[in-house]
Image (cartoon, rainbow, N blue to C red):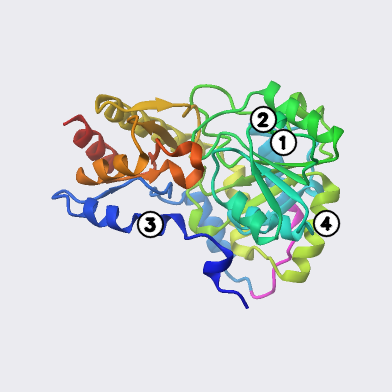
Amino acid sequence: MGRVSDRFPEFPWDTLAAAKRRAAEHPDGIVDLSIGTPVDPVPAVVVEALTAAADAHGYPTVLGPEAVRASAADWLARTAGVEGLTPEHVLMTIGSKELIANLPMQLGLGAGDLVVYPELAYPTYEVGARYAGCEVLAADSTIAVGPRRPALVYLNSPANPTGRVLGVDHLRKVVTWARERDVLVVSDECYLEHAWETPAVSVLHPDVCDGDFTGLLAVHSTSKRSNLAGYRAAFVAGDPAVVAELLAVRKHLGFMVPTPVQQAMAAAFADDEHAAVQRQAYAARRTVLRGGLEAAGFTIEHSEGALYLWATRGEPCRETIAWLAERGILAAPGEFYGPAGARHVRVAFTATDERISAAAARLAR
């Protein structure tokens, strides 16, 4: 059995230990903006649903109850304009990261298969592909892929870390290109409700796919819209043949979302009011933090969506991390997300109002 260190790179956030210690020495405490973890309360409607389902003495199903999957399909129709999605197209997952990390292996991909992901991307796309033994390529353009046919192409819009939002024309071109080559497209859309400057569109929207879900999967999460990161409640939807294949594999492996969490997820997707309130909170924090960064001489690039600001001082990212740590602020180095991020940092605005204001004040000095 190989050691973890031989099979995986060092976990990126472990390399921030020294900067975190330095930031924590600030007299007013650290402002940790390195990880986009929710800090606001779980909505009452979700807690009530979880509590009501607490007497879950039997095993849950891997697929999830039809009513729960219907709530996810209804939410996509209502929020993202996706037409024709039914419970047959939906599969519950134990958070979206779990699905992405295991997807290549659960689809039977391995040596000789190519997985393509964005040039600047959350590390799990690459790690999951390498875990399955696949070859990988970071590319933002289908032209960059060349003549070789990938087995799987990942999209991420609004994107982590850059906040870039892909338009309908871009998405449609990727889908057309992939269908001509029988390539599976998996769109990570966990920030779909957090587009600030331009609308975000699902790959399952009829303007992108003409209402045909063949060869398409969309991944969605409750972590950001409903503060349920601790619940690990997400789903994947799209091509029913691919969903059925994943279901068959995951039944063997026992990938089951706990029954109370499933019911909490259904309640979260059925209620838009709490999501609107949370969005307003993030919008306000974004404005405050952006102002602080720009006052300190940072340039903000992309950042049209998601819960981060993609910022640069025109210097190597680790120098920027050290500069921020001197002011008690911790961010994520852009190099975590690929070589193209070597002169940027990702700054999350998911901290409390008080901590965001504290960061902006320190930056303004």
Q: Which of 212 and 42 is in front in this view?
A: 212
Q: Is residue 203 left or right of residue 317?
A: right
- Rendered position, 36 above or below 254: above
Whether 74 is among the magenta residues is no
User: Where residue 154 sits in the image (x, y, percent)?
Assistant: 67, 42
Q: Residue at x 51, y 33 (%)?
A: 194
User: Where residue 352 sits in the image (x, y, percent)?
Assistant: 32, 44
- Rendered position, 253 above or below 131: below
Mark 3 or 1, closer to the camera? 1
Which residue is tagged 3?
Answer: 15
Distance, label 3 to label 2, CA atoms, is 30 Å
- Rendered position, 121 above or below 292: below
Q: Are marks 3 and 1 in contact (CB under 8 Å)?
A: no
Identify the mark nearer the N-term, 4 or 1: 1
Which residue is tagged 4?
Answer: 245
Q: Are marks 3 and 2 in contact (CB under 8 Å)?
A: no
Q: Which residue is drawn at 47% across and 51% down?
A: 44
What's drawn in magenta, residue-wise?
57-67
Which residue is tagged 1?
Answer: 145
Circle 4 packing at 10 Å, graded few (<14), some (14-19), many (20+), is few
Q: Which residue is drawn at 60% across and 74% down?
A: 2
The three-letter amino acid code for the residue at tag 3 is Thr
Distance, label 4 to label 1, CA atoms, is 26 Å
Identify the mark nearer the N-term, 3 or 4: 3
Numbered tag placed on residue 141 in the rendering: 2
Q: Is mark 3 on a helix, strand or loop?
A: helix
The three-letter amino acid code for the residue at tag 1 is Val
User: Where residue 40 sits in the image (x, y, percent)?
Assistant: 39, 48
Identify the mark nearer the N-term, 2 or 4: 2
